[in-house]
Image (cartoon, coloured by chain):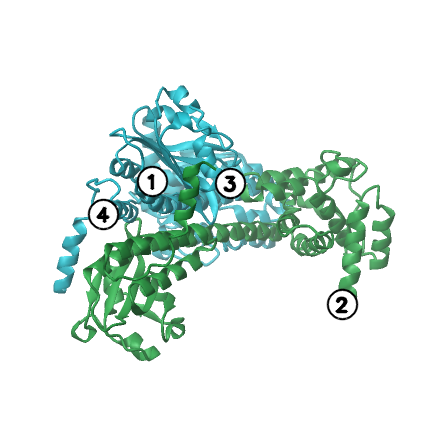
Chain colours: A cyan, B green
Amino acid sequence: MAPVQKTLAKNRKEHSLPSGAPGSSSLRMQLLDAVNRHICSSSRLSETVEQIVQTTQTALRAEASSVLLLDDSGSHLSFHVAEGAKASRLKHVTVGLDSGIAGWVATHKEPAIVNNVRADSRFTGEVDKSIGFVTRSVMCVPLVVHSSSIGVLEVLNKRDGSGFTEQDLECLEAVAATAAIAIENTRLQQKVEQGYKATMRSLAAAIDAKDPYTRGHSQRVVDYSVLAAVALGLSHNEVDVIEQAAILHDVGKIGIDDRILSKPDRLTTEERLIVQEHPIIGAAIVADIPFLADARELLIHHHERLDGSGYPHRLAGDDIPLGARILAVADAFDTMVTDRPYRSALPVEQAVAELRRCSGSQFDERVVEAFLGGLQTRATV
Amino acid sequence: MAPVQKTLAKNRKEHSLPSGAPGSSSLRMQLLDAVNRHICSSSRLSETVEQIVQTTQTALRAEASSVLLLDDSGSHLSFHVAEGAKASRLKHVTVGLDSGIAGWVATHKEPAIVNNVRADSRFTGEVDKSIGFVTRSVMCVPLVVHSSSIGVLEVLNKRDGSGFTEQDLECLEAVAATAAIAIENTRLQQKVEQGYKATMRSLAAAIDAKDPYTRGHSQRVVDYSVLAAVALGLSHNEVDVIEQAAILHDVGKIGIDDRILSKPDRLTTEERLIVQEHPIIGAAIVADIPFLADARELLIHHHERLDGSGYPHRLAGDDIPLGARILAVADAFDTMVTDRPYRSALPVEQAVAELRRCSGSQFDERVVEAFLGGLQTRATV
């Protein structure tokens, strides 16, 4: 490390909670430093917002503070974070955008300092009544992202009984700019995750529409695959990918003619080759979905066999991804123990014996033992 | 507006570009104010980052400044924004994470002030060589989100020939915290949009897997629907929703047995009732996808008829969403002018005559005229 680095690293430790000289520009810098540190260090942004609110309340010597956010309809503000006495009672409180100081600030996208709420016509006292708090003074600033108001940040009652100043307001506005973007960030992150889940549900619904049997089957293959994956000690992330692949492993059957899929007789060679296209078709269906890239690799190979006699790529041994080897065992087991158009279900003991018989040729031995061990543990619990 | 509001509104205008007293705490406050204002007011966050970089360079009296971001592989940094002489040449320049001052800062998540780059072993001069710039001094800070480094923000060459100070660094670090979260925000927003597109492509691929005819049909229905929607003067957003609904209008056919869909003979009453379930099945497939909520309403009703004799809900007149009335015309037209399993394509003139004949009973007259007008305009262009 170059000499200047040591000094810098040392200096950085000093940025912690502001000591609180209200209204001074040094306070403001310290407050912003603290806020910025929270943003850099916390891995969950909802926690960041809580920390921002708490830090601000302490620095501005207020009795209470809160963040209210506009709901989806855009007509109400609801408490997102609240600190101070009675804060816990605010959880389910909402206020109309057309009433109160918070509503005014959110609507007008202008800040407000009200040091005697009784003398301000915008103050309704409704929230006070509902939670048993007495507001004397309010300083409230809008949270603005992309020129739109998403809510407000407010502090209540200066601890020493004096009023909030314009210097306090400058502090609060600077914090609000950062808080707004942190909140927007959390929302976007949730939107990305909701998008993932929605896509999965939609594809599962498409499988279900094609063939309700396949859907029930997919759910059981998820169950068996996760059982084996956990027994093999795979990581949380690996288990997630296997779960996604298991839900979608037969999505490619959407592309296989119903006359073949539900044929009660033995398939011709030509028909069997058509059915064997389903992993490739499935991979094509999910090809453009970035978050399914890893699951797609397992989905393509869930009909490979350890000895290289499977399809579509005739992979053998460790060339088959472990997750795909797990899916193969789970898929085969569920197929054996349920009725199919061309035969009745096998008893569980017989299916277990069949897995063991094909262990080392069709199936990975470690996977078979992990799965059967997991199955037995569950049965005896 | 309460009296205090007027003062506040007036004060807020004063937060603009910092006047530039380097290293002073007032400079830092002004710089942060300017940065925060950019974030609140710009509707595109990529622009925000450009403005942040520009503002920072001016305030810190540097000759050049840039933001370098880690690429997806996490092994290289590439120039995202650059200001100053030669900046335009940096567009396609990338640097390895294992070399240079920027690489060191991104890897170690520690800032660096290097006031004589020739004396620093981390400096390689590679970028200078490739663009014809001469770096004398560098101040570089990491961009950190959720405890991970996403890149660096750097300023080069103090204009007056002096070096960067630790006070300058405090400024740059405060700006970096805000810039990092603004950049993360832009990325998340792109991820949400990519997720939308990926979901659409995946469902389109599922339709294609079921029946390649349907896919081609869906694309043409998009084309015809957009033609009619634009001719009717609908908004950009309304046209987008109609386009989504058009792509997906037959997704429910995934749930209809191939034996019925490709039957060359007339369908029995029972078979016809099964086919008529496809709008409901389609709506079920997209039900959990929030961004398709509006398109779903059109998809359900694309087989309603103006006189109330359609399906599934026998809606009539204006009770049928306008977008669904548009889909109905586009769908019927394409079905008539293409070969189907049960009959050959009609000539275009005959299909046009049929639309006109059923105008006012099956189809909305305004929609038919708008569509035919659009079709004619296109043919004569």
Q: Is mark 4 on a helix, strand or loop?
A: helix
- Residue B265 vertical placement versus B170 (above, below): above
Numbered disc in front, either 3 or 4: 4
Residue A201: which disc? 3
- Chain ID for label 4? A
Q: Distance between the residues labelled 2 and 3?
A: 44 Å
Q: Is mark 3 on a helix, strand or loop?
A: helix
- Chain ID for label 3? A
Residue A205 picture quarter: top right
Residue A49: which disc? 1
Q: Where is residue B233 drawn, in percent x and y? A: 71, 52
The crowding category of the residue bearing disc 1, from other C-alpha atoms within 10 Å (few below 14, some 14 to 19, many at least 20), is: many
Quarter in which the N terminus of chain A is drawn: bottom left
Residue bearing the label numbered 4: A26
Q: Where is residue B13 drawn, in percent x and y? A: 41, 51
Question: Callout 2, which amino acid?
Answer: Val
Q: How far apart are marks 3 and 4 (CA)?
A: 52 Å
Q: How many labels does the image show?
A: 4
Question: Callout 1, which amino acid?
Answer: Val
Residue bearing the label numbered 2: B381
Numbered disc in front, either 2 or 4: 4
